[in-house]
Image: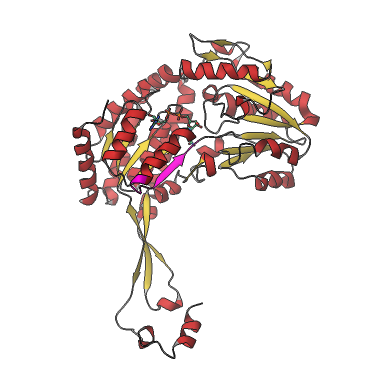
Amino acid sequence: MPVSEKATLELMDLRRSVENGETISYEFRRKQLLLLREAILRYEDEIYDALFQDLRKSREEAYATEIGIVLMEIRHILNNLHKWTRAESVKTNLLNFPSSAKIIRDPLGVVLIIAPWNYPIQLLLMPLVGAIAGGNTVVLKPSELAPACAGLMEKMIKEIFSNNHVAIICGDGAEVIPCLMRKFRFDHVFYTGSTAVGASIYQLAAKQLTPVTLELGGKSPAIIEKDANLEVAARRIALGKFLNAGQTCVAPDYLLVHVSVREKFLEQLKKSVADFFGKNAFTSSSYGRIINSKRFDTLVEYLSAGEVVYGGNHNREELYISPTIMENICPDSTLMSDEIFGPILPVFYYECIEEAAILILKNPTPLALYVFTSNKETEEKWMSRFRFGGGCINNTVWHLSNHHLPFGGIGTSGFGAYHGKHSINRFTHAKPILKTPNWFDPSIKYPPFEGKLKWFKKMIR
Ligand code: NAD
């Protein structure tokens, strides 16, 4: 659907709403957040149905990873909205005595939010919460690859918001987005999705000097040290990896297991997968499906890159791939250069951190890194050795759900973090203001400057 002149005119309405200051008051932002919360609760059943259609998510998984997490974010931001968005007084240095100083949190303006298909509700609405709390007007672009969710979000957003404040545009991203970004200058683009598309969004934005946030992917390793609690580690890895059939940006992409615990750990991992999804995950209501046949075919090809030691079953018609563990993988295969983004878990073995580092640094700056150990020094050694977006010690994935932590990538996994207060910072401009009274105006600050150097050196240091 090409972007029509009408759509461009509607974008001008969003711009006018910002310029008129309609979205700036605390009351307005609060009302928008309450409207969103109320709509999510009202649409709860329809959201479950749409997520089941697109990804066969269970209601429980849908609540925990899509609906509940957004409700939690709204509640956290509402509780702190006034404190986080009001002007903040800061100290003034000697040079500027007796001025006072403050930081005003200004909306960025018109923000474009582009979401992917894997958590099609959460990843569309979480940034929206931050953007409206920041006083912006917003254009939402859901992923066409999760059509039931995109259609439902279009209906919900149009019902609750005036399209002068929050608009939604659906359709094929490759067609819609470049056209939109060429015709209209957004004040910020917040993109979640693959690194390749992220790079093209970045280029489009650069032409108009539009700042961007890129929430991308990468190959996130999980490390199991010899002193890890293997039973707990196996459970937490199995959950993080096979949730949403592996289609989670922060899922452990591959494992590095200390060679001394190889057999014991693998045994525990297989047991955890069987405990979670039964002998045949196809019949488990807790196990999802691959988004489409294109992704299915790519994932099935990965199975030939090594030895399948658990699972490996698949059914194209049903878009089903069972939870799969692989060993003896060629480190140069596409399985180890692409982000897997599916229920296939390659396992490698290492003896020392530097041996593991060779594999990790082949895909540097992952979105997440996880380490399992009972030793504080070991934990610090792994945490400080690599650069990565964020991570967990003795856990996987859950750091994303703590709204006190910033969430985002580094390097090729993206830049700019959000969630909680970090979302307010992301979607506002920190405008610094200095206020100087008139009663004190020493001549030392004005020309002629001859002979004043020694005073400048006392005041400016
Ligand atoms: P996707 O194909 O749904 O694309 C994301 C968005 O980009 C969609 O709205 C789509 O319409 C749009 N798009 C697609 N092609 C485009 C183009 N050529 N030009 C402009 N826009 C285009 O999703 P995806 O990219 O397959 O998502 C999977 C990737 O996203 C994985 O790499 C995953 O790790 C990453 N991801 C990251 C996070 C995070 O928070 N960092 C979260 C989820 C997914």
Which residue is nearer to you in this view: 384 or 331?
331
Q: Quadrant of residue 90?
A: bottom left
Rendered residue at 29%/51% (across/down): 26
Left or right of 201 on screen, residue 403: right
Residue 202 screen position, x and y as percent = 41, 41
Asked whether residue 93 appears in the rendered view, the answer is: yes
Magenta-drawn stretch contains 215: yes
Q: Residue furthest bottom?
A: 451
Magenta-drawn stretch contains 279: no
Left or right of 46 on screen, residue 352: right
Rendered residue at 40%/38% (across/down): 201
Rendered residue at 38%/20% (across/down): 50
Which residue is nearer to you in this view: 74 or 95?
95
Residue 351 screen position, x and y as percent = 79, 35
**How many marks do you count on the picture?**
0
Asked whether residue 286 appears in the rendered view, the answer is: no
Left or right of 173 on screen, residue 297: right
Report the colour scheme: secondary structure
Which residue is nearer to you in this view: 194 or 73?
194
**Vertical placement of residue 25 versus 297, above or below:** below
Left or right of 188 on screen, residue 25: left
Q: Residue furthest right?
A: 260
- From the image, which quarter does the N terminus lie in? top left
Q: Quadrant of ligand 1?
A: top left
Residue 379 screen position, x and y as percent = 70, 44
Magenta span: 207-216
Q: Quadrant of residue 159?
A: top left
Residue 89 screen position, x and y as percent = 39, 65
**Vertical placement of residue 449 versus 56, above or below:** below
